[in-house]
Image: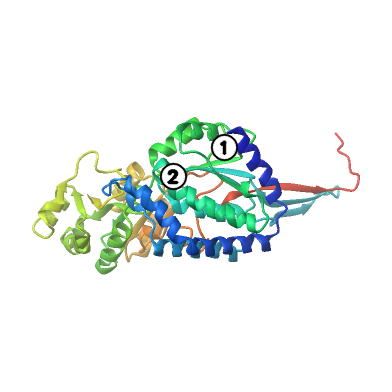
Amino acid sequence: MHRIFDLVKEASLDLAATDNETINRVLNAVADAAIQQAPAILEANARDLARMDEANPMYDRLKLTPARIEGIAGDTRKVSTLPSPLGRVLKHHVLPNGLELTRISVPFGVIGIVYEARPNVTFDVFALCLKSGNACILKGGKDADDSNRAIVSIIKDVLKQFSLNEHVIELLPATHEATAALLHANGMVDLVIPRGSKRLIDFVRQEATVPVIETGAGVCHAYFDKDGDLEKGARIINNAKTRRVSVCNALDCTLIHADRLADLPQLCAPLEQSHVLIYADDAALAALSGHYPEALLKPATAETYGTEFQSYSLAIKTVNSLDEALKHIRQYGSGHSECIVTENEATAARFLQAVDAACVYHNAPTSFTDGAQFGLGAEIGISTQKLHARGPMALEEITTYKWIIKGDGQIRTP
């Protein structure tokens, strides 16, 4: 394992000398290869899918389709069009003694990614790391191992065509031993980013001896205020919940102001088409009874709130005020994405200011929390922590900086 780390570290030094034009050509070639070799990727993905129960919430994340591969290729091409994040002058000034100080953006060097059944992450991580001058070491889950290996093989073939060091990307074995080695690769790996379940993220944070940026679980809320527009609310809640239920920006809980309980059936009506199972408190349950399929209605329990469902399930909680909604989000939110539906600008302003989350929305669904949607190209993850990066992490977030100091013989005196 250490030999692999050594090769990637060496490749990161080679990558530092590669010009941005070449990197962009490689990214476009990888996008082309993904589409041209889609049958091979889909064949490998089918083997992975055959080993997973379709009822598993991870199944949708694992599944690749021709359309999804087209989307991945498009995101890769988008990254190639973005300005290089390297060499940017972040700060510049001259000291009274004549020393000229410049702070510039530079790569981390080697970034390790620990992730689960998300083969699209393999493409996304490679594109962002290459563009930002970072080599990457991937540790995927066993559920997606065939897909990941097919993708990495295609990427390596493209790198060889451009005479670039193929070790700028490496995929470790899908074993616990490989995870442990990556998390303790001090001096060889500069940063580890986990992507996956809360359990995986907690494990990486607790076990790693190399620096970690968390991409936390997404327990996302939508608060429908007493001044909320019903049509907007129904669209927003339905989109946030049902667009893709397995992703971290999917809606988990709707908070509704008690004054608007009579509108709850209309607010939830679109969810019926997707057979969304609703766990509601007593007041919401009474409002929905007879208006929403009884088989899809269940009383909420103590465990309902704070759950990231990753399925066609939704919690509903009645609140009597904005303050109560904010308190609920503080208690049960994960710091990922939260939204308010209201036509009251003062209420919206207070919500946007008070909610402590990476992304806070007014009259828009949490489903927009995504690097590509934010115009960042692909993303390496959604950071829910506050150190260094927060929200969708793309090119700028996977660079660091160094100081360049130019003098003319000055010396420091006491």
Earlier residue among tags 2 and 1: 2
Please give left or right for residue 103 compared with residue 393 in the image: right
Residue topped by disc 2: 145
Tell me where residue 308 appears, x and y as whole percent.
32, 45
- Residue where numbered disc 1 is placed: 211
Horizontal and vertical percent position of residue 166? 62, 49
Q: Position of residue 367 (x, y in %)?
A: 37, 59
Mark 2 to mark 1 CA distance (whole Å) = 25 Å
Front position in the image: 1 or 329: 1
Tell which of 266 and 397 is nearer to you. Answer: 397
Q: Callout 1, which amino acid? A: Pro
User: Relative to residue 276, is residue 334 drawn left or right?
Assistant: right
Q: Nearer the viewer, residue 53 or 308?
A: 53
Label 1 environment density (alpha carbons within 10 Å; few <14, some 14–19, many ≥20): some
Q: Is residue 249 left or right of residue 314?
A: right
Q: Residue at x 43, y 60 (%)?
A: 39
Residue, x 61% and y 37% (percent of image)? 5
Q: Position of residue 185 (x, y in %)?
A: 59, 33
The number of callouts visible is: 2
